[in-house]
Image (tube, rainbow, N blue to C red):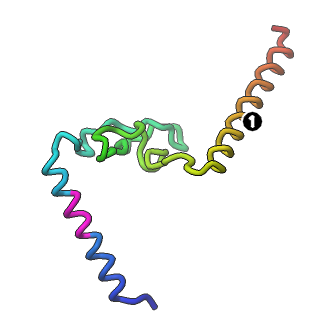
Amino acid sequence: MRDPWALLARLEANMRARAAARQERERHPELYVPKAERPACGARCRDGHPCRAPAVWDAKRGRLRNLRCRMHGGLSTGPRTAEGKARSIEGARKGAAARWYRWRDGRASTGG
């Protein structure tokens, strides 16, 4: 069973953080855009329609993060460690090579 006092402390900390964020928005309204006014994500969902969720707003910089919602990569920070960066580069390299081979094989079969 979870400790009820720990849960209460976590809820109070969350309420304090939300109040601080609200005060920060009121202090610097130029750095905040309401969700309803943000552009839509636009990523293709599984059934093919474009996502209509609002893009993620970076409050520290006062701008949109990368025009994607939280479900389609807007909250992603990318690889942070050297190992993660190397893994990402290797995956991109392999993907590019695979696309090139598919393109080359397609041209060879059509005679172009």
- Measuring 34% from the left and 38% from the top, which residue is drawn there? 64
Q: Main secondary structure of the magenta part?
A: helix
Q: Quadrant of residue 37?
A: top left
- Measuring 16% from the left and 46% from the top, which residue is drawn there? 28
Comparing 14 with 99, the one in front is 14
Q: Position of residue 7 (x, y in %)?
A: 35, 82
Q: Which residues are magenta?
A: 15-21
Q: Residue furthest front?
A: 82
- Measuring 31% from the left and 41% from the top, which residue is drawn there? 61
Q: Position of residue 68 (x, y in %)?
A: 43, 40
Reading the image, the residue beneath label 1 is 94
Relative vertical location of residue 44 with respect to residue 27 in this rendering, above or below = above
Q: Circle 1 — which element?
A: helix
Q: Quadrant of residue 107?
A: top right
Asked whether 78 falls inside the magenta stretch, the response is: no
| Left or right, 13 with reference to 85 | left
Going by the numbered disc 1, the residue's amino acid type is Lys
Relative vertical location of residue 106 with respect to residue 1 in this rendering, above or below = above
Q: Quadrant of residue 63?
A: top left
Q: Position of residue 97 (x, y in %)?
A: 76, 29
- Measuring 22% from the left and 44% from the top, which residue is drawn there? 32
Comparing 51 with 98, the one in front is 98
Q: Residue furthest left?
A: 27
Quadrant of the snapshot with the C terminus: top right
